[in-house]
Image: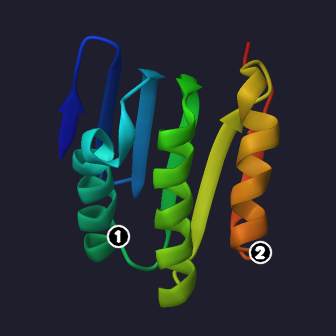
Amino acid sequence: MEIKADNHHIWYEPDRGAVIFQGSLRLAGSEEYAPIADLLHEVSLQHPENLTLDLRKLDFLNSSGINMLSKFVIKMRQKQQLIHVRGSRQIPWQSKSLKNLQRLMPSLVLEIEDME
């Protein structure tokens, strides 16, 4: 499973149980984020015990994208599935916005790392 565009690349690595986000997501509204939401849903069905969202190389995510991730986290909370989210301190939006995901799902494991 993979989504590629000019400014972003999102793919699933089944051996790690990880969805990797790379680039910049500036899509307009939930309709344009639907393929990404579908990918996350499909992955959650295949890898229900433990899923990692690796956002360390996602330079930008607009409010529509944050909304899409928030809805996904809420669905996973309702299913009681464990989610790990990995972010980077070097990308300014991640520290604040990713902590909000943890507020939606207290069991979410959040790792904000120093990337060199």
Q: Where is residue 46 in the image (x, y as percent from the top left)?
A: 26, 72
Q: Which residue does the image show at 46% across and 65% down from the upper left?
A: 72
Residue 82 visible, this orientation: yes
Could you say which quadrant of the image residue 92 lies in?
top right
From the viewer's perspective, is residue 31 above or below residue 84? above
Which of these two is toward me, 42 or 115? 42
What residue is disc 1 on?
A: 44
In the image, residue 8 sits, relative to residue 42, either above or below, namely above
Q: Residues within 10 Å of mark 2 (few under 14, many from 20)?
A: few
Badge number at residue 106: 2
Specify which label sits upstream in the sequence, 2 or 1: 1
Q: Where is residue 31 in the image (x, y as percent from the top left)?
A: 26, 46
The residue most toward the bottom is 79
Q: Which residue is at 34% across, 13% downward?
A: 7
Task: Relative to 42, say whether 45 is above or below.
Answer: below
Amino acid beneath label 2: Pro
Crowding at dot 1, Cα within 10 Å, few <14 / some 14-19 / many 20+, comes out as: many
In the image, residue 95 lies at what x, y percent?
80, 37
Amino acid type at image mark 1: Ser
44 sits left or right of 56 in the view: left
12 to the left or right of 109: left
Which residue is the extreme one toward the left?
1
Q: Residue at x 51, y 81 (%)?
A: 81
Which quadrant of the view contains residue 29? Answer: top left
Answer yes or no: is residue 80 visible.
no
Left or right of 15, for residue 106: right
Residue 52 percent location from the top left of the image: 51, 56
**Which residue occupies the foreground of this view, 11 or 26?**
26
Q: Please, what secondary structure does the residue beneath circle 1 have?
A: helix
Label annotation for residue 8: none
